[in-house]
Amino acid sequence: MRSALAFLGLLSFASSFLAAQDLDSLFRRAAALVNASRPSEAEELLRALIRRDAANAEARVLLGFLCLQRASLSDAEKSFKEALDLRPEHSGARLGLGLTWDRQGLPLRASQEFEKILDDRSVGHRARAHWIYSLFVQGHDEDALREARETVNRFPYVADYHNILGFLYQTRGRPKESFREFLRSVQLDPRNLPAYFSLIGHAKTERDWTAVLEWARQALSLDRNHPLLYQEMAEAYEKLGRSAEAESARQEAQRCYQAEILYTRACAARRGLRDGEAESILRECVAANPRLSQAWADLGELLRRNHRLEEAQRAFLAALEAAPGNPIAHLGLAATLQAQGKEVEALAAYQTALRRGVATPDLHAGLASLLLDQGKAREAAAQMLLAVRALPDAPDLLSYLGYLRQEVGAEAEAVESFAEALRLDPRQVQAHVGRGYAALSYGDLNLALNSFRRAAEVDPSNTEAWRGLIRAQRKAGLRAEAEASCRNCLARNPAETECREQLASLRVEASDFKEAVQEFQTLLRNGKSSRSTLEGLAFSLLRLGDCSQAIGLFEASLKRYGPDPLIFANLGYAYRLQGDIRAAVRNYERARDLSPGDPERHHDLAFALYLARDYAAAVEPFRTALKHRPDWGLAHYNLAMTYWNLSQYAPALIHARHAQEQGVREADAVVRALSASLGLDQSAAVNQHKH
């Protein structure tokens, strides 16, 4: 029905939701995109949402944090302030604005914002930790220490409070107390990287260089590409007299610094759509630091997009070697293998990702695509449902889920998915197309026509929309509209073969065989040599009187696609027109043998035998045709004439009367002649009426 590839925009969703009706759904989708590690798409969607809903404070807060994440402090400040103008009590906006002031080096302003939300349960711990630190930065050391102690006593299981208290003890020259707090912070949250730096700082103060190395190694298990950690190791090695190892660590730090700078430049080139420049910089980046998984993954994605699949595969494998849990690399590798036709390896790649706990919506959608290609529609639908649950309110995913549900015969659920997609985005083309096919399946032609028309209006270049519309129009008997749709489709997509084939077929139905021939020949020139094209061209040429070309095309179809009774029947007709009755009889016999229950095939053979004056042989196929179709007036008439030529006048009269009853006007004269005389002297009066 439709290609899954039409939906698999699934590897990079576009934010085409400006016309969406449910603003809450848009916000939920933006939040889901953030959770799916796709911040740029989330930011684009949030900006579109804010343009439509100027009073949406939540969207501004989430946008502010995304801007803060990419260090765009002015944009973050603007978003948080706008959110607070709308909702002054919004604690998330207060926290965000305080963090922004802190990053801008304005501790007093930051402190004022944090202080307003210290008792808010949703953000209080984070706000309080930053507030205590801002007191210290402002020079209020005693106040900061007092608040830190009280807070640790109140909340003994919050790692950040122990870390800030350890820092304050360290600044006061109290190493035992600071070490105790830093260690407690790491014990409470072993993945808190800043706490390890605190322990490293404490060890350096104590000149315990072995401890520096140990804490740095533990921190590197969290981030193997942190240049500062290698610098700390280099200093420790140097102090321990291990010069060679110190030099190696310094070089590693330099490589990590260089790779970070290059990666930032590569990201800017990618955002500017300068793929060649981005590829060159990324190659420099991974040469400087082969462990930088994200750089390998970005390089792989560039190569995959440019169809350099072998190189892309190597890049994604390198990304996974550096970071086995990298979700982008897992998805990229699986998609690359799939594009290479390595379905077994692609399936293994998807399964490996799932075993590692990588379960992003993109991964589920990609696996669904692969399963569908393997004919496993039910398993594909199950994976797509998981994708929708992971990334709700996504029209693209909902449309594809609807398509998969159609594939497994769950029409009601499919319609529900398409309806939900269109509620979120009334311009979602694939949902309109899917709903159109669903409507066709249960006979609602009006809904089908409206759905396909809307899809074609939204995206006139979408060939699937035009195909569906033409199909619905033909089913509704709207031939003129169907022809207009064919021409509209071809005006926008000249290489589209199905619409051209439909147009050719429509011209055949309109008996415009000349244009039909032109369209079929265009299809052949464009490489479309399907059975319907060959046979349609042959039939049209036959109707234009070009029997030789028609015969050649019919025989080519038989050679390519195997025996077919209709083609043999057409060949028989073509030979008959050429006057080669024997060849006609041979082909009609093949047609009859292939379709013994079809009265047309028996009649064709009988009439060819009649023309060959083999009247005795013609009787039986005429009789067989009438056995299958007793009220066929033409067959009765031709059998009457066959009996007449065999001088069997009684059965001739019987069949002539049957033909007369079925409205065959030529039978009137035959009945009169046979009724008037049973002698041979009336044969001349009858022969002029022979068919």
Image: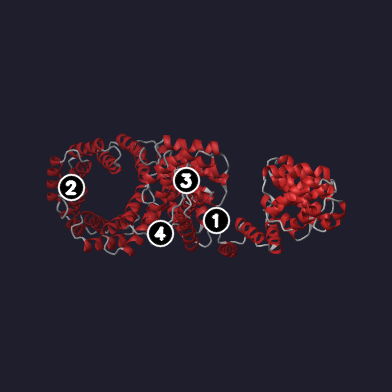
Relative vertical location of residue 647 with respect to residue 213 in this rendering, above or below: below
Under mark 2, the amino acid is Arg
Residue at the disc numbered 4: 426
Cα separation, mark 1 vs mark 3, equals 20 Å
Disc 1 to disc 2: CB gap under 8 Å: no
Name the residue beneath numbered marker 2. Answer: 121
Q: Residue 335's spot in the image, x, y percent?
A: 51, 44
**Three-letter code for the amino acid on which mark 3 is drawn:** Gln
Disc 1 and disc 2: Cα gap in Å? Answer: 62 Å
SS for dot 2: loop
Is residue 280 visible in the rendered image? The answer is: yes
The answer to which of marks 2 and 4 sits earlier in the sequence is: 2
Which quadrant of the view contains residue 549?
A: bottom right
Q: Which mark is in front, 1 or 3? A: 1
Marks 3/2: CA distance? 47 Å
State the separation of the CA atoms marked 2 and 4. 39 Å
State which tag comes first along the sequence, 1 or 2: 2
Mark 3 sits on what residue? 406
Q: Is residue 182 above or below residue 546?
A: above
